[in-house]
Image (cartoon, grey):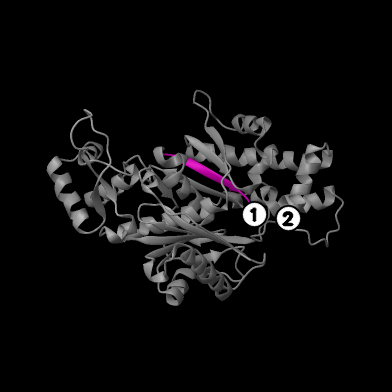
Amino acid sequence: MYDIDSATGDESSASLGCGPILPTASENAKPLRQQIFEHVRAAGRAARTDVTRALGISAGSATTLTADLIAAGHLREVEGLPRESGRGRPPVALEVVPEGRHVIGIKLSDETHSAVLTDFAGRMLADASLPTPPTRKTLDELLVEMGTLMDLVLQAANKTMADVSAVGVGMSGIVDHKTGTVPWSPLMASRDIDMACSFQTRFGVPLHVDNDANVLTLAELWFGAGRSMSDFAVVTIEHGVGMGVVLDNRLFRGARGMGLELGHTKVQLDGALCRCGQRGCLEAYLADYALAREAATALHRNPRNLQSPNAMLDALFAQAKSGNSAARTIFRRAGRYLSVGLSNVIQLFDPELIILSGERMQYDYLYADEVLAEMHELTLSDGRTPCRIEMHAWGDLVWARGASALALAAVTDTALGETRT
């Protein structure tokens, strides 16, 4: 019925660090105490001299503030840095006290929910998954499933909810991260759901919820290729089409926290019907349900056939690879719409890198050379270095890790004396 796993972090995994490596140039900088803590966590281990150089502060300030962080139980001293001369005692380094806080990250999906338990240093301690019927659910049904999933991941790590400081959730749809409400999601039977309030009332733990593309972008920013990049974008193609953007090392959400809905940008007036209820959305030409809609015709399947979109698309891809021209045209058409969407992203944000991710990226027609070539042709890039495109074949677990980063960021703000949204 479900899968669980546990992974106890060791010193080597702790030393890798997590979180953005580059400092932000924003005027809305965090308090120096928090900057020191986050620098140490990003480095994994750092000497006080490293802190002073990286943050441009005096040795006295570094000594005073790190002593405060140690006294508060957020940092600790360890011997683990190499000796510069090969003699004498190894220099003392600082690292995050991992057991200081624990958070859970959850990815809610159409068919399988996943969760991870993470400590304050960003190490994953356990994970779990829970199959779910592919139907729209009431809030109460979804909370029951989330409770079961959290029990599984806590049991795997021998923890309880009393050990959890916050929970992060990523889900598809329109999500207002600031208020914790969900105006619309294809996973839910109702609109305008106050998920954060209902969750905390039921489980007694703060919930931080965001669009699933945003949490995948956080996964790249905290644990992946985006750690050392100040500006990049992530485009996801799965049950829907999502997008996340990092500007100046921070996730960009828009004025009301509900921007960057790439899948619901319009590419055809009065076009194909999208699951949001409107027509002509990019998602209506790229997402799995959109491809499955045409696959039924190409494969001569009965429209009443209850075969899942995944099975339908696997069969369609096999047919395309074996030479079925109708199947090939479906993927090629989807690839052309993807090139339009990517060119618009480049034109609007000029990112250094676009990461393509999600289950549908297993279909190489979507990132074939002609797709990327058409993307560049549609972009005004004369005299500029072309935007890099990378494919990242993440599994389901990385979405949950991104949701854990959402919770870790909130817990860090609270623990270090600052409340931000």
| Amino acid type shown at disc 2 | Pro
Q: Report whether 71 appears left or right of 238.
A: left
Q: CA distance from mark 2 to mark 1?
A: 9 Å
What numbered label is drawn on residue 239?
1
Packing grade of label 1 (10 A; few <14, some 14-19, many >=20) is many
Say which quadrant the N terminus sits in: bottom right
User: Mostly what secondary structure, the magenta segment?
Assistant: strand
Q: Report whether 343 appears left or right of 327.
A: left
Which quadrant of the view contains residue 279? bottom right
Q: Residue furthest left?
A: 60
Secondary element at image label 2: helix
Please report contact status of discs 2 and 1: CB closer than 8 Å, yes or no.
Answer: yes
Residue 119 sits above or below residue 330 on the image:
below
Packing grade of label 2 (10 A; few <14, some 14-19, many >=20) is some
* Residue at the spot of label 2: 309
The reply to whether residue 419 is visible in this rendering is no
Say which quadrant the C terminus sits in: bottom left
Examine the structure image and report whether residue 8 is included in the region drawn in magenta.
no
Looking at the rendering, the stretch of residues picked out in magenta corresponds to: 230-239
| Amino acid type shown at disc 1 | His
The percent position of residue 283, horizontal first and vertical second, equals 65, 51
Q: Residue at x 65, y 36 (%)?
A: 367
N-term mark: 2 or 1: 1
The reply to whether residue 391 is visible in this rendering is yes
Examine the structure image and report whether residue 234 is included in the region drawn in magenta.
yes
The percent position of residue 233, horizontal first and vertical second, equals 50, 42
What numbered label is drawn on residue 271?
none
Residue 341 sits above or below residue 65 on the image:
above
Q: Residue furthest top?
A: 383
Q: Residue at x 37, y 65 (%)?
A: 165
Q: Report whether 360 appears left or right of 12.
A: right
Q: Residue at x 29, y 45 (%)?
A: 40
